Amino acid sequence: MKRPSALILTARYGSGHLQAAKVIAQEINRKGFESVVSDLFGESYPAFTNLTQSLLLKSFTYGPSFYKWFYYGTNKLHSKGLVQFSKYLGRKRLLELIALYNPSFVITTFPLHTAPFLIKKSKSSIPVYTVITDYCAHPYWTNPLIDHYFVASKSVKLSLLAKNIEEQRITVSGIPIRSSFEMDLNRKKVYRKYKISSHKKVITILAGADGVLKNVKELCETLLQNPAYQILVVCGRNEKLYEKLSPLVSRFPDSIRLFRYVEEIHEIFIVSNCLVTKPGGLTLTESAALQIPLILYKPVPGQEAENAKYFAEKGAALISYSNKETFDHIQRLFRDESLVIKMKNSLNEIYQPFSTKTIVDYAIQQMEENCVITL
């Protein structure tokens, strides 16, 4: 008998949506079911998707005011037909996927209105669940046809309630992250593996999977003046940044380590005394899981700014808008142990453990209770 399958729909606008989808798929597979992850827009409109992804990355760097208009502007436009327009995007590919895999349930980690619209229109019994991967909820995430929402925090739940989503359709699950962030790790082995000193303060700078963090070289040059610091820079896929920083390794061989994309990023996190990063939902959650103090650099208006605001208001992060401010925050952290303890406690309060299991267990339980399939 064919095993039940789940269809997980996502999009490659930022690495977080796809990473969350992969994590959920792995948990579904671990439970003995099949899963299929689909980048619905990318598979439907590859050329257009590549163009819009490129524009999105450029907007982070060169046009934050444009991104601000897009995020908050579409917030206002939501009720005027944005959902109506988007519910047909990827229609053909979605129908192909449903016919091919006959999923028992659908999970989306990106606001894709095509799925609930087409499935409910066809009077199918396939439930559609949405996982919101930020600490805020743009109205574009909401759709009356979605069966259940999984959200990062109580504040996101409250924002959905304010949009007339029934409470029984919302679970505060946290954001799904890789299970490696929830496992014990031998720090000594990590220090040896990456040639990191356990006697220095380790500052990790995350340029992002696509290398969108800017002014990294200038920040490193400032930090490297202090021999008590060791700098780890994760350049992601930004080869230009890696090459630009390489001369610093020759000048300061004991004080800086460069990495491209790091699959075992939890190992880097576990030996870090603080992280300098952009405030993506998954990165924040991973940091919260390990209670690593955060410095959030120049949040772009939109979900980045909302994420940063949430963590800062909770006392779990500091926000900086310049290299000087970042440097000052780092010095303050390393001088004030009480601040570090407070931030770690706040991160622990924010973190929702085993979120992936919560989401998958709910979906499977509903499937079994509703007798969608015969096991």
Image: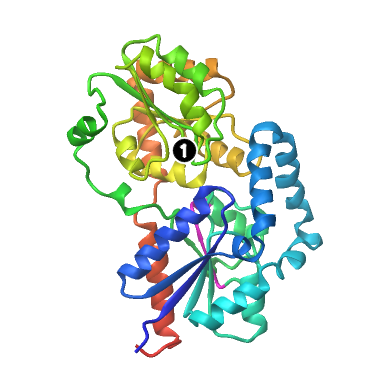
Q: Which residue is mark 1?
A: 236
User: Taking 283 as reference, is 10 left or right?
Assistant: right
When the figure is inspected, residue 131 is found, relative to residue 57, above or below; the finding is below
Chain part drawn in magenta: 147-154
The number of callouts visible is 1
Residue 5 point in image, percent of width and height: 43, 77
> Camera-side residue: 220 or 116?
220
User: Taking 251 as reference, is 306 left or right?
Assistant: right
When the figure is inspected, residue 62 is found, relative to residue 266, above or below; the finding is above
Residue 373 point in image, percent of width and height: 42, 88
Is residue 89 in sight in this rendering?
yes
Q: How busy is the neighbourhood of tag 1: few (under 14 within 10 Å), some, or many (20 plus)?
A: some
Residue 257 point in image, percent of width and height: 35, 25
Badge 1 amino acid? Gly
> Camera-side residue: 257 or 330?
257
- Residue at (42, 36) in percent of width and height: 260
Element at badge 1? Answer: loop
Quadrant of the image occupied by residue 212: top right
Quadrant housing the N terminus? bottom left
User: Taking 49 as reference, is 173 left or right?
Assistant: left
Residue 374 point in image, percent of width and height: 38, 90
Quadrant of the image occupied by residue 184: top left
User: Taking 51 as reference, is 205 left or right?
Assistant: left
When the figure is inspected, residue 333 is found, relative to residue 153, above or below; the finding is above
- Residue at (50, 50) in percent of width and height: 16
Is residue 139 in sight in this rendering?
no
Q: Is residue 149 magenta?
A: yes
